[in-house]
Image (cartoon, helix red, strand yellow):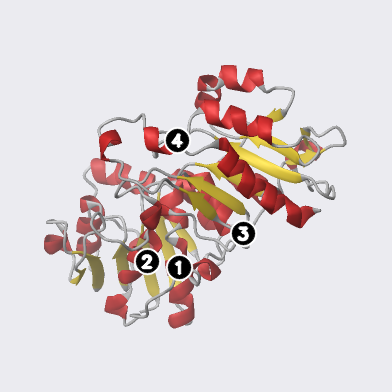
Amino acid sequence: MKRIIISRTDNLGDVILTLPMAGILKQEMPGCYIIFLGKKYTKPILDACEHVDEFLDWDELKVMLDAGCWMLDNEKFQADVILHVFPVKEIQKLAKLAKIPVRIGTSHRWYSWLYCNKFIHYSRKKSNLHEAQLNLKLLEPLGIKKEFPLLEIPSFYGLTKLTPAPYQGSEDGEWRMENGGQKSEVREVRGVFNLILHPKSKGSAREWGLDNFSKLIGLLPEDKFRISVTGTKEEGALMKDFLDQHRNRINDMTGKLSISELLAFINSCDGLVAASTGPLHIAAALGKRAIGIYAPMRPIFPERWAPLGKNSTYLVLDKKCDACRKTGDCECIRAITPEQVAEKLLISNLGNE
């Protein structure tokens, strides 16, 4: 079993929590070649992982499949094993047509019975395991049946192939492009905590609210925290009033960073605050002070999606959240106070002094 495809064609946070599979496969099956099948926009994450040998672009493959080209003359899709971490019917069908010998999937998707030949019997939605632990269950048909504690999993991320950040801290606290983005080095200031706030989630999570982020900014001492706000260009437009309100205190990075630049930028900072989003999981995987803010609702609760990293933590109310289930406006997550978040950040900042 030398060539192994890991198929995960959803979003950034999901991909981050799948990376430990590659690290464990490299440890348990020395010499194996890992191919990661994912969306094009997640490629920078996979390029930065030392355990991934090759990226296979699902967006390009899907165009071919949509055009009716199912029998692909493509050596890249030849493998000994495929792990359907995020089940996609078309990918499962393609794997069977490609005659991949070992095709592992969950038994809870009807089409898996048509196209897979090794099964894991569990329901992600009903499980109390973390997403990363559920991913690793798919390794059992390969003889890797060890139970991996949450504290052990972060050692397998393998995000070591990082590029320099394109922005550098200046003496006046602003972030500026350095040599056209070719060189960057964060200015080390004793006692200053470089913090990223990522208020939006592109609909992937319940959000804490801009009012809470505004109050948090006011609670953090200016001489101790240098604050940047990240997000897409579209999210920046949605946050225009919030960004204008705090323009003298924050560095607005919305719409300025590609995924590879966002990865490098997070790595250049000390911590990040967000809901359950890709940037939160990136920060956790890089060992930053990642503080996640969660709703206490299955299956989006932290037991399933908490950030995993040596310096990560989260906040969630100890209550049922069923009243919020049918609305995107979650009172339970908004009830977490800025003071609670500030307390965790101020404790973190002690290490910089």
Q: Earlier in the sequence, mark 3 or mark 4?
A: 3
- Camera-near label (3 vs 4) is 4
Mark 1 near mark 2, Cβ–Cβ under 8 Å? Answer: yes
Task: Give the residue pinned by disc 4.
Answer: 335
Q: CA distance from mark 3 to mark 2?
A: 19 Å
- Camera-near label (4 vs 1) is 4
Q: Earlier in the sequence, mark 4 or mark 1?
A: 1
Residue 150's label in the rendered image is 1
Q: Earlier in the sequence, mark 1 or mark 2?
A: 2
Tell me the crowding category of disc 1: few under 14, some 14 to 19, or many 20 or more residues within 10 angstroms, Cα based.
Answer: few
Q: Earlier in the sequence, mark 2 or mark 4?
A: 2
Q: Amino acid at mark 1?
A: Leu
Front residue of 165/203: it is 203
Secondary structure at badge 2 equals helix
Secondary structure at badge 4 equals loop
Classify residue 30 as left or right of residue 5: right
Q: Amino acid at mark 4?
A: Ala
Front residue of 343/97: it is 343
